[in-house]
């Protein structure tokens, strides 16, 4: 499955809205000074991300275009409660070569750097099936607009063994998969995108040719009011389209959804 070409009216929304970078670490700083700067920078980054969730012009434009003309882009190939339901070994057997996770509410609580505890076993299974081929592609950690020095990206890599955080310029759902494909050394059609947001993770994944898996949010605690309301709208629209018989895009490596879904191990 190749990348989907959108009409120019929607493609124009693939523009990034950047804030200036203001935080830098200096090699002459003492360890305590560096740690203080890391803490300060990550706190400011969290504030910036929270503000951005209230106003994301490119995302709003693409949201409107998808909802009006291309609703199938918001439908994932696979829907599961959380990643424990994913059969990682089967995905590898089918020919997929790597996994790309969203961060907030997919594998961590919002703004947290720690893997959600109940996902630990499934994440270990994912690492076993895709050793050295797991990445995070987030609108927080690694996004240069909010993590200009990569401090949060490195902190996440240190906190969760076996992941690489993709550094990138453009927020999902806008942008291409170029940075991801460069890291994995293969087409996005051979990769799995896992996230909790239909109009962010799923739309981005489908536009760029990934196999898309949508999870339910791990927790609503810590999410801003606007994110909660947008999530309700996303779910309302997706449920309506599904009831109307709309189907997800076809992926060449997946013939049956049940191939890759299994009850969590007890």
Image (spheres, helix red, strand yellow):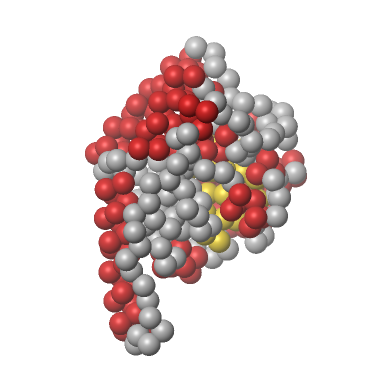
Percent x, y of residue 226: 27, 37
Q: Quadrant of residue 197?
A: top left
The answer to whether residue 109 is visible is no
Which quadrant is the N terminus positioned in?
Answer: top right
**Vertical placement of residue 238 versus 186, above or below:** above
Q: Nearer the viewer, residue 176 or 142?
A: 176
Residue at x-position 41% and y-position 21%: 237
**Vertical placement of residue 88 versus 44, above or below:** above
Q: Quadrant of residue 34?
A: bottom left
**Vertical placement of residue 147 versus 61, above or below:** below
**Vertical placement of residue 114 versus 257, above or below:** below
Residue at x-position 71% and y-position 50%: 186
Residue at x-position 40% and y-position 37%: 59
Q: Nearer the viewer, residue 69 or 77?
A: 69
Instruction: Kindly give the residue lying farthest to the top in the view shown.
Output: 244
Left or right, 234 with reference to 215: left
Residue at x-position 57% and y-position 34%: 207
């Amino acid at each position: 499955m190749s990348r989907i070409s959108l009409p120019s009216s929607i493609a124009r929304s693939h523009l990034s809205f950047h804030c200036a970078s203001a935080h830098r670490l200096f090699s002459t700083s003492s360890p305590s000074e560096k740690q203080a700067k890391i803490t300060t920078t990550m706190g400011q980054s969290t504030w910036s991300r929270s503000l951005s969730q209230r106003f994301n012009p490119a995302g709003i434009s693409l949201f409107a275009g998808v909802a009006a003309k291309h609703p199938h882009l918001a439908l994932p190939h696979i829907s599961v409660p959380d990643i424990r339901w994913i059969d990682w070994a089967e995905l590898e057997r089918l020919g997929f070569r790597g996994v790309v996770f969203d961060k907030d509410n997919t594998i961590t609580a919002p703004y947290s750097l720690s893997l959600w505890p109940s996902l630990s076993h499934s994440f270990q299974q994912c690492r076993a099936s895709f050793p050295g081929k797991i990445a995070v592609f987030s609108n927080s950690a690694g996004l240069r607009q909010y993590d200009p020095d990569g401090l949060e990206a490195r902190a996440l890599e240190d906190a969760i063994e076996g992941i690489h955080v993709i550094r990138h310029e453009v927020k999902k759902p806008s942008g291409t998969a170029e940075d991801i494909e460069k890291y994995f050394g293969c087409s996005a059609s051979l990769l799995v995108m896992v996230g909790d947001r239909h109009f962010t993770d799923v739309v981005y994944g489908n536009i760029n040719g990934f196999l898309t898996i949508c999870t339910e949010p791990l927790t609503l605690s810590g999410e801003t009011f606007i994110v909660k309301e947008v999530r309700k709208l996303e779910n309302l629209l997706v449920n309506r389209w599904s009831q109307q018989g709309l189907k997800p895009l076809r992926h060449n490596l997946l013939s049956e959804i049940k191939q890759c879904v299994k009850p969590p191990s007890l």
